[in-house]
C-alpha cells in the first residue's frame, strides 16, 4: 500500500496523453512498439532493427492501443488514478499520474529533490524495482509521422518544455514538449552540464515530441533545450530549463571508482575496471542490437553487454576477449540474480519469461543462485535451464564508474 504524503499535492493527470497500457495479471508489455527507437545521437546514423534471433516463438500479449497525442489536455485533480491489476514490475503505482511535488522531499541520501514549475515527478516506482527507461517511455504515445511538405525553416520554438523524472532514478529524465510549428519535422534535444574539462554538450535527434535523456550523473546540474528543424533549416530553440539529478542509491550497485582505465592492467585484472566499448562475438539471443561493452570482473570472467538502452541490455559471459560470449542460464528462475554480473544488488527485471524446454538448446553458462560460481554446459531445451533476451538491473551502462 502506498502511503500518501502529509502535505497537499497538486496532481497532474495527463488523461489524453499518458494512457495506461496494461495486460492481465502476470502479462508483460509487448516490445512491438519499439518505443523511442526513432531517437538517435547526432551523427550516429539510422537506428538498426532489433535482433530477434531464435525468439520468434515467444507469444507477446496484445495491449490496448493508445491514442496519438493530437492535443495534450492537462487537468488538475487532487485524487490519484486507481491501480489496475498487473505484474509487480510492469505496473508502477499511479504511473499515469504526474505530480508537481515528489512523494518524498529528500532522496535516499537525504538530499532535497529539485522542484521547479517545469518539473513533474513520477512517484510510483518501488524501492526494490530497477529503473526502466523503456517502461517510462511506454506511457508517452508515439505520433504517426506522415508526409509533410515544408516551405521554409520552422519559425516558432516548441512550447511547454517539461522535465519528467522518476523518483529513485537519477540516470535519466524524459523531456516532453508541444509542437507549435507545422514546418517542424525533427528536433535537436540539447543537454548541457559542467564537466571536469568545462562545458559538456550532448545532442539527441528525434521526430517525436518527447525523448529520454540518458546517462545523467547523480547529484549533477543540467540545462535542456529543444530546437526544431527540417531539411530547409533550423528554427528557434526553447528557453533552457534547469534540472538537478538526485543521489545514486548505494543499495542498487557497487560504486566503483578508481584510476584511469588502462587496457593492459585494470581491464585484464578486473581491478577498478570500467565498461569499455569492445565488439565481441556473441551467441546471440537478444532483443538488443546497440553498442557492445566489456568488463573483466572479480570472478575472472569477461562480462559482455549489448545495449537496448542504458538501463536495458543483454548480459553475456566469456572466458576470453577473443572467444565467444555465451548466454547465461538460470536453473531456478529467469535470470533475475544475473544482475550481479553488472554489480547490481537488485534482483532485476528480465524479458519474456518462458520455460527452459521452450527455448532452443544451446551451449552457455548457468547457475542456480546469486554468488554461486557458473558452470558451462547445455541450456534451454531438455536441460530445462532458462535464459532471457534482456535484463534491467537498475545500473546504467556505460554508467558512473
Image: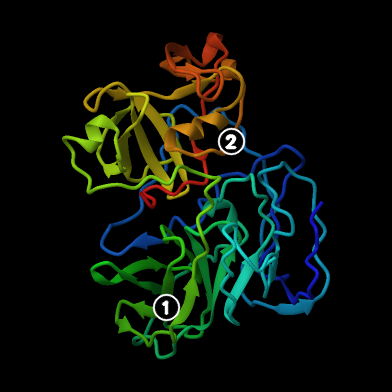
Q: Which residue is mark 2?
A: 347
Q: Nearer the viewer, mark 1 or mark 2?
A: 2
Residue under the point 45% across and 11% down: 378
Write the residue at 37% across / 39% down: 306
Q: Is residue 112 left or right of residue 5?
A: left
Give the quadrant of residue 337.
Answer: top right
Q: Nearer the viewer, residue 65 or 387?
A: 387
Element assignment for label 1: strand
Q: Position of residue 46 (x, y in %)?
A: 32, 56
Say above or below: 123 vs 280. below
Q: Is residue 401 left or right of residue 212?
A: left
Residue 149 in sight in this render: no
* Residue 14, numbered circle: none
Q: What is the distance, in whole Å, between disc 1 and disc 2 at their CAs? A: 36 Å
Q: Can residue 378 be seen by looking at this rendering?
A: yes
Percent position (x, y) of residue 305? 37, 37
- Classify 344 as above or below 396: above
Picture quadrant of residue 163 = bottom right
Question: In the shown orientation, is residue 182 left or right of residue 137?
Answer: left
Please rate how many residues cluster around mark 2, counting C-alpha atoms within 10 Å: few if below 14, some from 14 to 19, many from 20.
Answer: many
| CB within 8 Å, label 1 to label 2 | no
Query: Which residue is at the far front?
Result: 110
Please name the residue shown 50% across and 18% down the image.
367
Q: Which mark is residue 226?
A: 1
Amino acid at each position: 500500500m502506498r502511503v500518501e504524503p502529509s502535505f497537499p499535492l497538486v496532481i497532474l493527470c495527463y488523461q489524453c496523453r499518458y494512457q495506461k497500457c496494461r495486460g492481465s495479471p502476470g502479462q508483460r508489455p509487448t516490445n512491438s512498439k519499439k518505443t523511442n527507437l526513432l531517437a538517435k545521437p547526432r551523427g550516429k546514423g539510422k537506428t538498426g532493427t532489433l535482433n530477434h534471433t531464435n525468439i520468434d516463438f515467444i507469444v507477446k500479449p496484445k495491449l490496448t492501443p493508445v491514442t496519438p497525442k493530437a492535443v495534450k489536455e492537462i487537468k488538475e485533480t487532487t485524487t490519484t488514478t486507481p491501480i489496475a491489476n498487473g505484474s509487480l514490475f510492469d505496473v508502477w503505482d499511479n504511473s499515469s499520474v504526474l505530480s508537481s511535488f515528489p512523494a518524498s522531499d529528500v532522496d535516499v541520501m537525504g538530499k532535497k529533490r529539485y522542484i521547479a514549475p517545469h518539473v513533474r515527478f513520477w512517484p510510483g516506482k518501488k524501492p526494490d524495482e530497477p529503473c526502466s527507461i523503456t517502461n517510462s517511455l511506454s506511457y508517452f504515445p508515439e505520433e504517426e509521422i506522415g508526409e509533410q511538405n515544408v516551405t521554409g525553416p520552422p519559425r516558432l520554438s516548441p512550447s511547454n518544455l517539461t522535465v519528467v523524472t522518476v523518483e529513485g532514478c537519477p540516470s535519466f529524465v524524459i523531456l516532453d514538449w508541444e509542437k507549435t510549428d507545422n514546418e517542424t519535422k525533427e528536433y535537436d534535444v540539447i543537454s548541457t552540464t559542467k564537466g571536469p574539462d568545462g562545458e559538456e554538450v550532448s545532442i539527441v535527434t528525434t521526430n517525436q515530441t518527447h525523448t529520454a535523456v540518458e546517462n545523467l550523473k547523480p547529484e549533477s546540474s543540467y540545462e535542456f533545450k529543444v530546437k526544431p528543424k527540417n531539411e530547409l533549416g533550423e528554427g528557434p530553440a526553447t528557453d533552457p530549463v534547469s534540472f538537478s539529478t538526485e543521489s545514486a542509491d548505494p543499495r542498487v550497485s557497487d560504486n566503483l571508482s578508481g584510476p584511469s582505465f588502462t587496457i593492459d592492467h585494470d581491464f585484464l585484472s578486473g581491478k577498478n575496471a570500467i565498461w569499455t566499448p569492445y565488439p565481441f562475438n556473441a551467441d546471440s539471443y537478444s532483443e538488443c542490437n546497440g553498442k557492445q561493452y566489456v568488463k573483466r570482473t572479480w570472478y575472472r570472467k569477461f562480462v559482455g553487454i549489448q545495449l537496448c538502452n542504458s538501463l536495458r541490455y543483454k548480459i553475456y559471459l566469456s572466458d576470453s576477449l577473443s572467444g565467444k560470449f555465451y548466454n547465461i542460464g538460470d536453473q531456478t528462475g529467469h535470470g533475475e540474480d544475473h544482475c550481479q554480473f553488472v554489480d547490481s544488488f537488485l534482483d532485476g527485471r528480465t524479458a519474456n519469461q518462458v520455460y527452459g524446454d521452450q527455448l532452443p538448446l544451446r551451449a552457455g553458462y548457468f547457475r542456480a543462485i546469486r554468488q554461486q560460481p557458473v558452470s558451462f554446459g547445455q541450456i534451454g531445451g531438455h536441460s530445462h535451464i532458462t535464459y532471457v533476451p534482456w535484463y534491467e538491473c537498475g545500473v546504467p551502462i556505460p554508467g558512473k564508474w
